[in-house]
Image (cartoon, grey):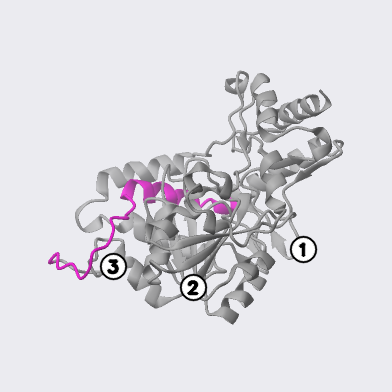
Amino acid sequence: MSQFQDVIPVAGPWVTEREVEYVADAARNAWFSNHYEYNRRFEEAFAAYVGVKHAVSLPHCTAAIHLSLAAAGIGPGDEVIVPDVTWIASVAPVIYVGATPIFADIKKDTWCIDPKSVEAAITPRTKAIIGVDLYGSMADWAELRRIAERHGLMLIEDAAEALGSEYGGKKAGALGDTGVFSFHGSKTLTTGEGGMFVTNDDHLHQRVMTLRDHGRPPGDKLFLNTEVGFKYKMSALQAAFGLAQIERVEELITRKRQIFNWYREALGDIGGITLNAEPQGTLNSYWMVTVIPDASFGMDKFALMEGFRERKIDTRPFFSPLSSLPAFADRPGSSAYMPAQPAGEFIAKSGVNLPSGYHMTPDLVQRVADALKQILKA
């Protein structure tokens, strides 16, 4: 690991000869009648792993959320409840379809959307809830499902960061009406860029298959578009890479959990910090190891990141509340149902993602832990 003597990267993939061989084969052979072979194999293997009927490979997770909303007919005049603290890609598609995002608070332990805050934000215009499994943690899907069924709402599970996590014996992505995943280069499973839509709903699946190909129904050879849709397809080269990764998924998840356990041991003697939670009945795949220092340290995330930068360690800030971003400054109504003192405010202000890529070793984890101790002590 001498290549990381200068700077420890915050994320990185685990690539083997299997990925290289599959991509090379796709480059040679995934054309003509075989052009979708790797996509089909990737989708089938992915659906089997998650435990759902249908999986559709896409260029990114944002497309999967966009298609989920569009397939359900959500549009202007509708409201979609979303967590205030998440990456903007979880929420941007709500605006793509002309609907209004309504922010809800997150829970202190899991950092996922708080069902009580969701319930408080429901109006006659509410059509859907998007729950995000943040940093590998799992939302309270049983309660979200009860709320959705009670009010007749669509439930979308953004599992972009939680491949391999589990809730009540079910895999992340299988707990909503639709589930969505990201295969960005930093993610647990990567295709460089890419995403996946999953569902058990035959109607939603058929709508997505049509909408993602410019409104062409599956099997259309005559370019007789039935509606205006989108262009959301994954290349065979990416699918080949993804197939190799999903065939190694248990190995990938085991390593992610191992990295977290290295951190938990190395940071065990530091008081006043909180790491990723794993409540009873859940399994956390720990996409990113995240630390939240107590307020007593008097440090926000940017000061903490600067301390790591000075020690040649790359980190990432906990996502900022969407309601605080300039991108949503002209949408004050989106925050109408937020509590006066959101739990997510302090978490987002203080949290930092530590280096969590597959390049991490016990020695590199110890180097990060020692740096954190020095920064907090100072």
- Residue 202 vs residue 128: left or right? left
What kind of residue is marked 2? Arg
Q: Which of the two residues, 155 or 210, is positioned nearer the viewer here?
A: 155
Q: Secondary structure at mark 1?
A: loop
**Residue 343 in magenta?**
no
What kind of residue is marked 3? Thr
Magenta range:
222-251
Q: CA distance from mark 3 to mark 1?
A: 40 Å
* Mark 2 or 3, nearer chain start: 2
What residue did someone put label 2 on?
125
**Residue 236 in magenta?**
yes
Residue at horizontal 25 percent and vertical 56 percent from the top: 34
CA neighbours of label 1 inside 10 A, class few (<14), some (14 to 19), many (20+): few
In this rendering, the count of numbered labels is 3
Q: Secondary structure at mark 2?
A: loop
Q: Image quarter for residue 267?
A: top right
The dot on residue 39 is: none
Q: Is residue 64 visible?
A: no
Residue 269 is situated, as x and y percent measured from the top left of the image, at 87, 36
What residue did someone put label 1 on?
280
Residue 234 is situated, as x and y percent measured from the top left of the image, at 34, 52
Furthest-left residue in view? 222
What residue did someone put label 3 on?
210
What kind of residue is marked 1? Gln
Q: CA distance from mark 2 to mark 3?
A: 27 Å
Residue at horizontal 66 percent and vertical 64 percent from the top: 117
Say which quadrant the C terminus sits in: top right
